[in-house]
Image: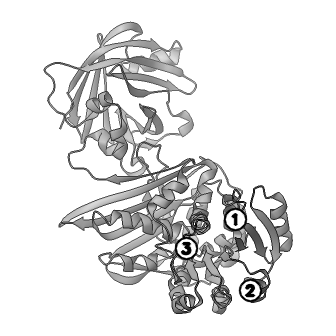
Amino acid sequence: MKILILGGYGVFGGRLAQLLADLPALELLIGGRNLAAATAFCHAFVGRARVRPLQLDRRALAPTLQQEHPDLVVDASGPFQAYGGQCYAAIEACIAAGTDYLDFADAADFVAGVGRYDAQARAAGVFVLSGVSSFPVLTAAVLRQMARCMDIVSVEAGIAPSPYAGIGLNVMRAVVGYAGAPVKLRRDGHDAHGIGLAESRRFTVAVPGRVPLRNLRYSLVEVPDLQVLPPEHPAMTDIWIGAGPVPDVLHRMLNLLAKARHQLRLPSLQPLSPLFYRVLNRMKFGEHRGGMIVRATGRRDGVAVLQSWHLLAEGDDGPYIPSMAIEAIIRKLLQGQRPALGARAATHALELADYEQLFEGRSIHTGFRREVPGASLYQRVLGSAYATLPASVQALHGPSAAKRWHGTARVERGSGVLSRLLAAVFGFPAAGEQVPVVVAFSDEAGGERWTRRFADRTFSSLQTAGVGRNEALLVERFGVIDVALALMVDGGRLQLLPRRWSVWGVPLPRWLLPGGNSFETEVDGRFAFDVEIAAPVVGRIVAYRGMLDAQDGQDEGRE
């Protein structure tokens, strides 16, 4: 199969070529106006697929199609918002040449308008799919899954790229171009407009059992989903989709410029895109993680339903996700599976199961979250991952768990002056072997009060489900100190990982955040705990590990 990739040396086209590198049956024509860039890409390419540079202009594609006779054209150039009056020139050339076509288009009007070529594409015996990327293909697949259990009424979604992902200049031109401009969407049951990058909401990407992303600010972006998804869900009254780029200071600067353009009726900000491109691709710091969230509300049998889907991508795997939809279609083509003929938005190109196969073997994790009536505190925070915990750990944290547990523990204390002082202030236990332990639970403030007695020493903390910036985290309060913990399920262990902390509600620097290796697990059918509390500069304050069993006669549930 010969595939012509327009903009094949760019960010999305280049990543697509890398995803296809293992396929010796492919010849990839790396096309674009910059022959030197295409040649350099081909020289650096490593893989079994064959690559060849090609100089061309997408606006005058017919001669190339007549000469090369590619089986498929992939437009990965853009920005599609700036294609102008001849925006469908490449599609028209492909239909005329009888060549199948896919693109990465993120421009809503462009994708929504491709259907005008449906009859011509059918007559030519080709398929033309537009918007073959995370938005709208992945979003649409997620919503179809959700629609099995409810009539979808409202949708919010967002994508948070890793700060190390890198972004192409054409993508930046598109984003900055619609900053402060009207963006078509569905609102309050009517076709309406939002203002690009001037409207913001906050989301937390939290795959059950994984360390969530930070609670981030997302701003409205112009993506095809806003126009092509509402018709697929007749009950949908609202849809809003945003992006959460970091660093936050650059994001907020874009917000201010977008609001200024809208309120002062200024011209397009697109001339500033090279500046933002250079700054964004140099300000790379923080965690190398990215994610995506789709949250929907709806009704089933007259009852309100809230459901969310989360994707978390670690390291270098995340930036490849936008290119994976086209990768999947090409691999299916090699197996003889062709999309239906005609021209349309690519909302039905893949199902969620197709993506799950693409994510296998990569550091990409997904999961749904649903509200469960009567769920315990840990069930609410962990979501579906709660069911993967060992039986004894579930027994301690379940809604009908005993309110009193007992056992023994080994306690170790830090030896420094500061560690001893802090241990005394919080009432942590003294060092010892086979120390008798009693842990009592009581309902308080919508959470659980944990009262721990080690021999003659007692200390307590209040655990609640995090809200706001601590959403999807477990917040444990020791007096005036709140520590927000991520609950991670890994290898039969429930790990408790500190993520944020504050004193009297005032956030404190993360580099001073207390830490330590703390987890719960099961040993010989019994609940086992291993807790370490340490702090930078101070070192270990206290560590205790041991076993607990439900105390006889104390099996009354917590809720």
Q: CA distance from mark 3 to mark 1?
A: 26 Å
From the viewer's perspective, is 497 left or right of 58?
Answer: left
Residue at the spot 71% in from the left edge and 56% down from the top edge: 282
Q: Position of residue 299 (x, y in %)?
A: 24, 67
User: Label 2, on which residue?
Assistant: 61
Instruction: Please state which of the two labelled residues, at mark 3 or mark 2, is closer to the viewer.
Output: 3
Q: Mark 3–mark 2 contact, CB under 8 Å? A: no
Q: Within the image, what quadrant is residue 2 found in? A: bottom right
From the viewer's perspective, is 463 left or right of 12?
Answer: left
Front residue (pair 41, 213): 41
User: Which residue type carries mark 2?
Assistant: Leu
| Name of the residue lying farthest toward the front | 336
Residue at the spot 45% in from the left edge and 27% down from the top edge: 518
Q: Position of residue 38 (x, y in %)?
A: 81, 69
Residue at the spot 66% in from the left edge and 66% down from the top edge: 12
Front residue (pair 339, 105): 339
Q: CA distance from mark 2 to mark 1?
A: 21 Å
Front residue (pair 13, 445): 13
Residue at the spot 33% in from the left edge and 70% down from the top edge: 154
Label of residue 338 in the image: 3
Q: Is residue 91 visible?
A: yes
